[in-house]
Amino acid sequence: MIAKGTDMSTGSHVDSYLIRVFQALRRIIRAVDIYSRRLASDFSVTSPQLICLTQIVEDEQTTLSSLSKQIHLSSSTVCGILDRLRIKGLIHSERSDVDRRKVVITASDKGKALVRDAPPLLQVDLAHNLSAMPPGELAAIAGALERIVQMMEIRHLESSPILALESEPAQDRAEKHTND
């Protein structure tokens, strides 16, 4: 749905592209949501928990800082995830015999079984399909997605529950507010 006040002089072909972009974004969000719900209902874990657990199983043993770096999440976020995995009996942690300051994290048998039985991580299938694409097409997709992220990050979040196209680009609004 296009918001009121949108400049319609751009033509209907632009409007159809905009609709396609928003539909594609909604489909991506929906796919992630369906995957997350399946993990929660069938395996009682969240996607971030499965990502952490999978990495722990692959590494056989790791530390909080190493795991944080590998999965590109902050140590504080990973610490909370590990606490929940520990409560579920999916991991063990103990002080290193070599360096008592380090805590070594390993997957329990239950954790290893969950990783073996869970569906592949969403990004694994996506990465496989993307890697089969011609480099130029992959570069175009990467650039377009990075641009979308950039456009979304400069806007302050509003309470509107519906994605709408605004008549004034976010960057112009941001510059106006800076000059006020």
Image (tube, grey):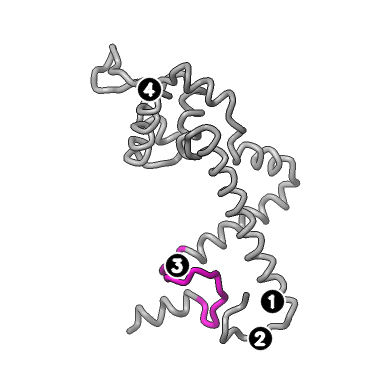
Find out whether residue 105 is within the magenta segment.
no
Which of discs 3 and 1 lies nearer the camera? The answer is 1
Amino acid type indicated by mark 3: Ile
- The 10 Å Cα crowd at callout 2, few under 14, some 14 to 19, many 20 or more, is few
N-term-proximal mark, 3 vs 1: 1
Camera-side residue of 45 and 12: 45
> Mark 4 sits on what residue?
105
What element does badge 3 sit on?
Answer: loop
- The 10 Å Cα crowd at callout 1, few under 14, some 14 to 19, many 20 or more, is some
Query: In the displayed structure, would residue 11 be above or below residue 162?
Result: below
* Circle on res. 15: 1
Q: CA distance from mark 3 to mark 1?
A: 22 Å
Region in magenta: 153-169
* Circle on res. 154: 3
N-term-proximal mark, 4 vs 2: 2
Query: In the displayed structure, would residue 152 be above or below residue 56?
Result: below
Amino acid type indicated by mark 1: Asp
- Please identify the quarter of the rendering in which residue 5 is found: bottom right
N-term-proximal mark, 2 vs 3: 2
Amino acid type indicated by mark 4: Ile
Q: Residue furthest front?
A: 41
Q: Do residues under tags 1 and 2 come within 8 Å of each other at their CB atoms?
A: yes
Residue visible at 35% across and 82% down in the picture = 179
N-term-proximal mark, 4 vs 3: 4
- The 10 Å Cα crowd at callout 3, few under 14, some 14 to 19, many 20 or more, is few
Magenta span dominant secondary structure: loop
Q: Do residues under tags 1 and 4 come within 8 Å of each other at their CB atoms?
A: no
* Circle on res. 8: 2
Q: Position of residue 87 (x, y in %)?
A: 35, 28
